[in-house]
């Protein structure tokens, strides 16, 4: 796994955006993006939106697939991932809303929602570039610890830890939905390239488990060790429990020209 350690969250955003833009350039204007919610990728999204605004990046023909959605939250609820994606990605990236997809969390259609979402991803040709955050417990999407490492899009129950972590968006833990629909780990792993961003010391344990720990469903993100093209972009605080920090920095400082990003980590 490629590991890029940045001095702070702003730099994570700049490097994250540069990495995603480079991968998008390889694919072309019809790129299929995999998009994550949560606070972690916001700095990256901000920088990508700036590239779109300045004309350096054109995503008008791109498609996008969100990782997950809460079950039972109306799509127009401000914290639904439908609304969050529209606000933080679709509009600032100038994506065509008709090409932006979010799993269907309507309880009346849940029995088919997973299969329908998988079919939509397949029909688009699969995800080219997946942007990921990570939960403090190592979850990716909403694939909580012990999720099958080959799982497909389906309904999951949120852990108490995730409910507590996400209560900040809802005002209280009781207001957080208990269930979600999420792309499976097997689904996420089919993306052609994956860029995970994480910041802050609360993510240090998960980051260390994912990058340097054993492959285990107890830390779902550790599955990225099996991906041929995964990059973790983290700040110093999130890197706090890593053992090979100096090595990762040395690798980044000595990248061959064709792999270089036009942004410094400091
Ligand atoms: C959320 C999302 C994930 C996200 C993670 C971390 O619950 N379902 O996609 O990566 O938890 O969130 P944050 O970046 O806000 O810490």
Image: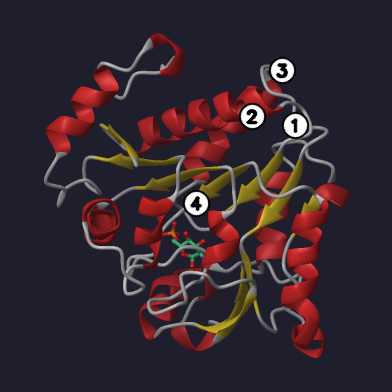
Return the disc, 1 or 2, that comes first in the chain's sequence: 2
- Answer left or right for 209 relative to 45: left
Callouts 3 and 2 close, C-beta under 8 Å: no
Return the disc, 3 or 4, that comes first in the chain's sequence: 3
Q: Which residue is mark 2?
A: 24
Q: Is mark 3 within 8 Å of ligand 1?
A: no
Closer to the eye: label 1 or 2: 2
Q: Which residue is mark 4?
A: 132
Label 1 residue SS: loop
At label 3, counting other C-alpha atoms closer than 10 Å, the crowd grade (few under 14, some 14-19, many 20 or more) is few
**Which quarter of the figure is the C terminus placed in?**
top left
The foreground one among 97 and 228 is 228
Measure the alpha-carbon separation of dots 1 and 3: 10 Å
Q: Which residue is mark 1?
A: 59
Please state the horizontal and vertical placement of residue 250, each as a whole percent of the image.
19, 23
Q: Is mark 4 within 8 Å of ligand 1?
A: yes
- Is residue 266 in sight in this rendering? no
Measure the alpha-carbon separation of dots 2 and 4: 15 Å
Callouts 1 and 2 close, C-beta under 8 Å: yes
- Answer left or right for 51 relative to 75: left
The foreground one among 254 and 241 is 254
In this rendering, the answer to whether 190 lies above or below 26 is below
Please state the horizontal and vertical placement of residue 239, each as a whole percent of the image.
21, 45
Return the disc, 2 or 4, that comes first in the chain's sequence: 2
Please state the horizontal and vertical placement of residue 187, each as a whole percent of the image.
60, 62
Q: Residue furthest top?
A: 257
Measure the alpha-carbon separation of dots 3 and 4: 25 Å
Q: Which residue is mark 3?
A: 55
Q: Is mark 2 within 8 Å of ligand 1?
A: no
């Amino acid at each position: 796994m490629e590991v890029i350690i940045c001095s702070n969250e702003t730099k994570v955003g700049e490097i994250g955006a540069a990495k995603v833009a480079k991968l998008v350039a390889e694919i072309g204007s019809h790129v299929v993006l995999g998009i994550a919610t949560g606070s972690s990728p916001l700095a990256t999204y901000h920088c990508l939106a700036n590239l779109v605004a300045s004309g350096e990046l054109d995503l008008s023909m791109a498609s996008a697939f969100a990782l997950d959605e809460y079950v039972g939250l109306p799509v127009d609820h401000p914290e639904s991932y439908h609304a969050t994606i529209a606000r933080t990605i679709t509009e600032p990236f100038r994506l065509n809303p008709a090409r932006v997809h979010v799993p269907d969390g309507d309880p009346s259609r849940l029995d088919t929602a997973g299969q329908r979402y998988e079919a939509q991803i397949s029909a688009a040709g699969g995800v080219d570039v997946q942007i990921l955050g990570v939960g403090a417990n190592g979850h990716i999407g909403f694939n909580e610890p012990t999720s099958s490492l080959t799982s497909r899009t389906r309904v999951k129950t949120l852990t108490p830890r995730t409910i507590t972590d996400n209560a900040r968006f809802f005002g209280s833990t009781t207001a957080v939905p208990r269930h979600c629909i999420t792309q499976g780990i097997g689904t996420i792993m089919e993306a052609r390239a994956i860029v995970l961003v994480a910041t802050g010391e609360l993510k240090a344990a998960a980051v260390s488990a994912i990058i340097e720990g054993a492959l285990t469903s107890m830390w779902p993100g550790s599955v990225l060790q099996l991906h041929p093209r995964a990059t973790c972009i983290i700040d110093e605080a999130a890197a706090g429990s890593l053992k090979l920090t100096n090595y990762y920095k040395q690798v980044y400082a000595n990248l061959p020209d064709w792999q270089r990003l036009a942004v410094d980590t400091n």
